[in-house]
Image (spheres, helix red, strand yellow):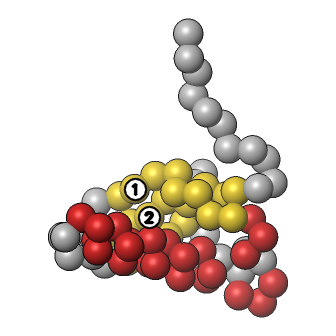
Amino acid sequence: MAGKRRMETGKFVPFDVFYEDGTRSSNRKVPAEILGGLDGDMPARDLLEEQERRIAEASGKPARVISAVKRTGAKEK
């Protein structure tokens, strides 16, 4: 029986992406090494927006506009 592949701890951080149209994409992987420092999680949003542009280009559909990103499982403040 095949199990789910788990993200290797420390290499990637999972993020939930929320779009302006109300949809959500869960567990999008972001390399842990680009996070932290003074920018916090902002580099994750930049990377995810770039991924959206590449996906849109490849599919021929317009890119979805990201309204928010949040670490998967993060508590609301």
Question: 64 above or below 29?
Answer: below
- Position of 77 with respect to 12 (left or right) is left
Query: Which residue in the structure is indicated by mark 2?
Result: 17
Residue farthest to the bottom, as pictured: 38
> What residue sits 75% from the left and 44% below the top?
8
Quadrant hosting residue 12: bottom right
Question: 39 above or below 15?
Answer: below
Residue 74 percent location from the top left of the image: 62, 58
Q: Which amino acid does label 2 sit on?
A: Val
- Confirm or deny contact between disc 1 and disc 2 (CB under 8 A): yes
Q: Is mark 2 on a helix, strand or loop?
A: strand
Query: Which residue in the structure is indicated by mark 1?
Result: 25
Residue 72 percent location from the top left of the image: 58, 54
> What residue sits 71% from the left and 87% below the top?
39
- Position of 53 with respect to 68 (left or right) is left
Q: Can residue 67 be seen in this view?
A: yes
Question: 34 above or below 39?
Answer: above
Mark 1 vs 2, N-terminal side: 2
> What residue sits 34% from the left and 67% below the top?
55
